Image (cartoon, rainbow, N blue to C red):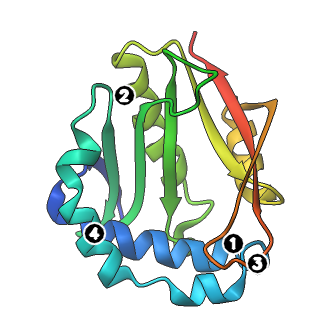
C-alpha cells in the first residue's frame, strides 16, 4: 500500500473526513490556545452532518472551493477558499481554512493543500488573498510566512463559545499573487 498523499477537490461525502481532520487538528494545534472545554466539546460526527447539510451553500459562491488531501483513501487534510469576508478587503480572496492531521505535520501535505488553494484563488481572478491566524499559533504563523503570507497589522477579537473564556485573538496575513 502506498503512503503517497494526493490532493483533489472535495465532495459532499467528504464532510465527515473533513470534520475528523478539523477536530483532531484543533485539539492538538490549539491546545493551550483555546479553552480545553471548547476543544473537548468538539464532535466530529455532529460537525460532519452539519458540513454535509451546508455543503451546497458553502461551495456555491463564485471562487469558493474546497480541497482534501488523501492518503490510502483516508482524508488527512482539508483547505477551503473563497472571496474574502473582511469589509476592508473587497475583491480579494481568502484562505478560509487549512488543516492537516497532526500525524502528517511537516510532511509536505500542508504545502500541497496550500498550493492547490492558492492556484484556485488565482484561477478565480483574485490578485491578493488573506487569512486569519490564531494569536500565539507560532507553528501556523511560521508555515504561512515560509509561503509568503505576511502580517498586515489587522487584528480581530472574537468571543469564544464559553462566555467566561477569554476572547480569541486573530492576526491577518496577506499575500499578493505575482
Q: Residue at x 50, y 70 (%)?
A: 101
Q: What is the distance, in whole Å, between disc 4 and disc 3 at their CAs?
A: 25 Å
User: Tag 1: Cα neighbours inside 10 Å, few (<14), some, or many (≥20)?
Assistant: some
- Quarter holding the C terminus is top right
Looking at the image, residue 155 lies above or below residue 89: below
Q: What is the distance, in whole Å, between disc 1 and disc 2 at their CAs?
A: 27 Å
Percent x, y for residue 111? Answer: 54, 45
Label number found at residue 30: 1
Q: What is the distance, in whole Å, between disc 1 and disc 4 at their CAs?
A: 22 Å
User: Tag 4: Cα neighbours inside 10 Å, few (<14), some, or many (≥20)?
Assistant: some
Q: Which residue is mark 4?
A: 50
Q: Earlier in the sequence, mark 1 or mark 2?
A: 1
Percent x, y for residue 102? Answer: 57, 73
Q: What is the distance, in whole Å, between disc 2 and disc 3 at their CAs?
A: 36 Å
Q: Earlier in the sequence, mark 3 or mark 1?
A: 1
Q: Which residue is mark 3?
A: 165
Looking at the image, residue 122 lies above or below residue 66: above
Residue 62 can be seen in this image? yes
- Quarter holding the N terminus is bottom left
Label 4, secondary structure: give it.
helix
User: Tag 2: Cα neighbours inside 10 Å, few (<14), some, or many (≥20)?
Assistant: many
Task: Specify whether 127 is left or right of 10.
Answer: right
- The reply to whether the C-beta atoms of the residues labelled 3 and 1 are less than 8 Å apart is no
Q: Earlier in the sequence, mark 2 or mark 3?
A: 2
Viewer-side residue, 49 vs 111: 49
Amino acid at each position: 500500500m502506498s503512503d503517497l498523499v494526493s490532493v483533489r477537490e472535495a465532495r459532499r461525502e467528504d464532510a465527515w473526513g473533513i470534520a475528523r481532520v478539523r477536530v483532531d487538528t484543533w485539539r492538538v494545534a490549539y491546545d493551550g490556545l483555546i479553552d480545553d472545554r471548547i476543544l473537548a466539546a468538539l464532535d466530529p460526527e455532529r460537525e460532519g452532518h452539519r458540513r454535509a447539510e451546508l455543503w451546497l451553500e458553502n461551495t456555491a459562491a463564485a471562487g469558493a472551493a474546497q480541497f482534501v488531501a488523501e492518503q490510502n483513501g483516508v482524508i488527512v487534510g482539508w483547505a477551503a477558499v473563497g472571496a474574502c469576508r473582511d469589509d476592508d478587503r473587497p475583491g480579494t480572496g481568502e484562505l478560509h481554512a487549512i488543516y492537516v492531521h497532526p500525524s502528517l505535520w511537516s510532511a509536505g501535505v500542508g504545502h500541497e493543500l496550500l498550493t492547490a488553494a492558492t492556484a484556485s484563488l488565482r484561477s478565480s481572478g483574485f490578485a491578493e488573498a488573506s487569512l486569519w491566524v490564531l494569536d500565539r499559533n507560532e507553528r501556523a504563523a511560521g508555515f504561512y510566512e515560509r509561503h509568503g503570507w505576511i502580517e498586515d497589522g489587522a487584528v480581530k477579537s472574537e468571543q469564544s463559545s464559553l462566555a467566561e473564556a477569554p476572547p480569541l485573538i486573530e492576526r491577518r496575513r496577506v499575500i499578493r499573487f505575482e
